[in-house]
Amino acid sequence: MAKSPWELMLMGHRDEALRLMRDTYARASSGTSETIQLGVAYLWIGDYAAAWEHFDAANRRRPKDVDALYQLAGAAKWCLQDRRRAVDEWIVGCDCNGTDGARGASSPLLLFAASVLAPDVFLPSEAERIMSARAETAWLNNWPGPVLEFALRRTDEETLRKNCVGVNELDTAERIWYTDFYLGIRAKADGERSRYMELMRRTTATSPRDATVGRKQFVSRIWGAEFFIARDELLSTR
């Protein structure tokens, strides 16, 4: 049975995996899912320049179409140490047609992360203003709305953890790692360095089983900009 591109990637066959992803991307006429898959593969292998060019080209073709593409473009710039451009991408992501279930909580949350990790680039007060405005939506109960409420200190960790129960096992696992990242960002803001580092490690943890039985959870996790921001944070503190 033929292996999927991500199985090949995680087994060390990087070139073959990328070839298959590029072929799929070309055949799909640059569909959103295929665009994300190839761009995330570039991020995974650390080719941040290629990831940026890929996502930026997609966003130029379809401006303000899907927020996830701006989020990942910003992640590429963040890992290239261009924090200001990363923030610019996430700001545009706040004004896209296609958003998350909370109708656009995820891009403001990335701005919250930026305001904690690089307050000289993006002010915490500005992140709070944007999050507060987005928190007025009637869709806030949908994921990741509960994380936005936590970032605004309107709920506690226990309440947030209860909201991590998703519609299935994969959804729950994705919510848990996403929550770990933002719990880590809050710990960083509160001066809890050891907890911050532990949660960044938990957010980016991978294992050999990801190539087989854990592949779906692994892929859903790395489709988020937060994974690569956390990995960059860990690398920068070595």
Image (cartoon, rainbow, N blue to C red):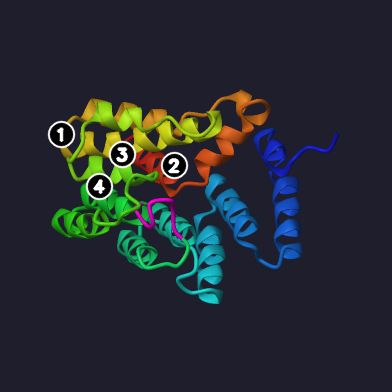
Q: Secondary structure at mark 3?
A: helix
Left or right: 5 as drawn, with respect to 47: right
Quadrant in which residue 147 is drawn:
top left
Give the distance between the C-alpha atoms of the residues marked 3 and 2, in whole angstroms.
11 Å
Q: Quadrant of the N terminus?
A: top right
Left or right: 22 as drawn, with respect to 49: right
Outermost residue, right side: 1
Quick one: label 4 or label 1, which is nearer the N terminus?
A: 4
Q: Secondary structure at mark 4?
A: helix
Q: In the rendered image, which residue does mark 2 sit on?
A: 227
| Residue 103 falls within the magenta-colored stretch | yes
Q: Amino acid at mark 2?
A: Phe
- Magenta segment range? 99-105
Give the distance between the C-alpha atoms of the residues marked 3 and 1, in whole angstroms.
14 Å
Pointer 2 and pointer 4: residues touching (CB < 8 Å)?
no
Quick one: label 2 or label 4, which is nearer the N terminus?
A: 4
Give the distance between the C-alpha atoms of the residues marked 2 and 1, in whole angstroms.
21 Å
Pointer 2 and pointer 1: residues touching (CB < 8 Å)?
no
**Residue 125 — which label?**
none
**Residue 117 — which label?**
4
Quick one: label 2 or label 1, which is nearer the N terminus?
A: 1
Q: Secondary structure at mark 1?
A: loop
**Residue 191 — which label?**
1
Label 2 crowd bin: few (<14), some (14–19), many (20+), radius 10 Å: many
Relative vertical location of residue 136 with respect to residue 186 in this rendering, above or below: below
Q: Amino acid at mark 3?
A: Tyr
Give the distance between the C-alpha atoms of the residues marked 4 and 1, in whole angstroms.
12 Å
**x and y, in percent, of residue 95 in the image:** 37, 68
Quick one: label 3 or label 2, which is nearer the N terminus?
A: 3
Q: In the rendered image, which residue does mark 3 sit on?
A: 182
Relative vertical location of residue 70 with respect to residue 152 in this rendering, above or below: below
Give the distance between the C-alpha atoms of the residues marked 4 and 3, in whole angstroms.
12 Å
